[in-house]
Structures are given as structure tokens and as C-alpha cells.
Amino acid sequence: MATRISRRNFVKDTALASAALTVAVGVKSAAAQGKTPQDESRPTTGPLPAAKGTLPMGKIAGVEFSRLIMGGNLLGGYAHSRDLRYVSQLMKRYNTEQKVLETMELAEINGINCMNSYVMDGNAELQKHWKRGGKMKWFAQVRIDPGGSFSQVTKAADLGATAIHITGDSADALMEKGQIEKVGEMMDFIKSKKCIAGIGAHSLPALVECEKRKFNADFYQKTLHTHDYRSAPGPGETGSLGTYDNSWCNDPDEVIEFFWTVKKPFIAFKVMAAGAIPPRKAFQHAFNGGADFVLAGMFDWQVEEDCQIAREILGDVRRTRPWLG
């Protein structure tokens, strides 16, 4: 028996079918251009929107930086995801060029004036952000060339880096090989490029040795977080990376104690143990523990909340180490 269709239902069903077809065509068209639907969500040309908030600032080598620095790992797809192997690819799919530009815009209008990323990632989005009037300062991560030269430093300086620092894994490796003097050579080379120079490390002994030798660095960058999370290092795990890529600061109390003796600005990173610790708890531990700046990776939807958390914590910080930045 045939089903009778009323005029009202016919119009309703036709409209729904038309809307579905329009969405499908739009998705197909975006896919054909190598885009995803989220790429169409926000304009990335013209001047930046008006600022929505500010953040407390500090200085390194006389240059003013927001105390919350945006990390670049999430934007580049670098995921410390324990044994979840798909996460890095998922982040790369989410953080399209459009989304990275949106994230930088959100960071700047919420008070963040600097970001940190690896020089060899290209940083094309940062260049586009600058072209539309963005003022984001750049901390460039660099490594030493296989032959021992510093071409990545030159590249970072040429691309517009304000500050350049050796990556933590590089400093750690040089310490283990007994070649820590190369870090000092790099600091001098960075200074010759008229950039702020820094030393990053996952392991504390590398920084202790650099401080002992009085290398010409303007700041240190060290992992710092509590062990109050499920995959924290267990008994016998002493390396800077634990089982399943889950540990970066085996000695938080020793780090805090070390920086009591250091008269250089301290940037704390991996403060959330790659997302295992909530930002409020992580930021509070780092700032109260003596960090002058916190470097934190953020997705676009986390930026505004993380900035607000940082404002609240910095407004009632309870630290005993004096601000050195």
C-alpha cells in the first residue's frame, strides 16, 4: 500500500535533503582543496582583532615577554602520548595551517606575546602571522649539525627569532658524551647573531655543568612538574624519558633547589607532563617553585582558559625565589 505524503512533510523533507547535499558538497569541495571543514571557521587576513586581555610580563636580556609562553609541539604534531601511537597524526590533522593561524591569533589577543618552536619545522604560519600585523616574538629551538657547526642558529636568526636556545635532548646528549663545551660555543655564536641565547635541558646535570662553566647564556629552560600523575616515573626509572615516553622531570625538588642558586631567568617547560597534569595545578607548581616563565602547549580551544588561569595564579603567587625575569 502506497504511503501518502502531505505537502508539509514533502517541503520539510526536501529542505533537509537540500541542506544535507549542500553540506556534503561543501565538505567534498574543501577536501578537494586539501582542507577540512574547520578551515573555513575564522578569517586569517586583515588586522588582528582587538586584545581581550593582558598577561603579567617579565624580561630576559632587556626584552619583555609574557610570563606564559605558547609551546609549538602541539602545533607541529609532536606528541608525548605514551603508547598511543595515533595521537601525533591526529594533532597534525587537526592543526591545519588555518587552525595554527587561529591559535596564534587567540594567543596574542589574550596576552601571550611569544611562542617557542623548532626552527626546522618551517614556521610558515608564524611568518604569515607577522605579515598580518602580529607581534608574536619567537624562541627558536635549535640543534647542532652532525659536523658540529651551527647552521640552525643562522637559519633561526635569518627567520626573525628573538631568542634561540639549544634543545633539551641536545644538551643532555652532549653532557653524556663529555662534549658540553659545545653548548658554550653555541651560546657565543647565538650572541654573535644579536639574539638572546638560552640553554634547554631535560636532565638537571647538564644545566648544573653549564652553570658551573659560566657559559654565556641569558636564560635556562628546564622541565619541571610534579609526579602526581598515573604514568609518572616509577622505582628505578632515572632517565629523562621513562617507559612509554612518559617522564621528563625525575627530580622536581632538586630543580627547585638548584634554581635558588641561579641568577638567570628560568623558563619551565613540560609543566603538565604532556597533558597528564591539569594546567592550574601545573602552572601553580611551576611559578611557586621559582619559574619566571612557563612554556605550555595549547590547542586553540585551551588558549583563553589557560591565559585566565595564568592571570589568577600570578595574581596570588606564593614563591620565595625572587623574580629574575
Image (cartoon, grey):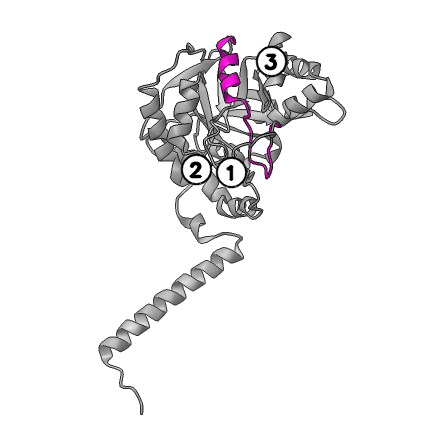
Q: Where's residue 246, x and y in %?
A: 55, 35
Magenta residue span:
239-262
| Foreground of the two, 3 or 123 | 3
Quarter that holds the C terminus: top left
Q: Secondary structure at mark 2?
A: helix
Label 3 amino acid?
Answer: Val
Label 1 amino acid?
Answer: Leu
Query: Tags 2 and 1 in contact by the CB under 8 Å rule?
Result: yes
User: Which residue matches tag 2?
Assistant: 103
- In the image, is residue 249 part of the stretch drawn in magenta? yes
**Looking at the image, residue 210 lies above or below residue 55:** above
Mark earlier in primary sequence (1, 3): 1
Discs 2/3, front:
3
Q: Where's residue 56, x and y in %?
A: 36, 20
Label 2 amino acid?
Answer: Thr
Q: Secondary structure at mark 3?
A: helix
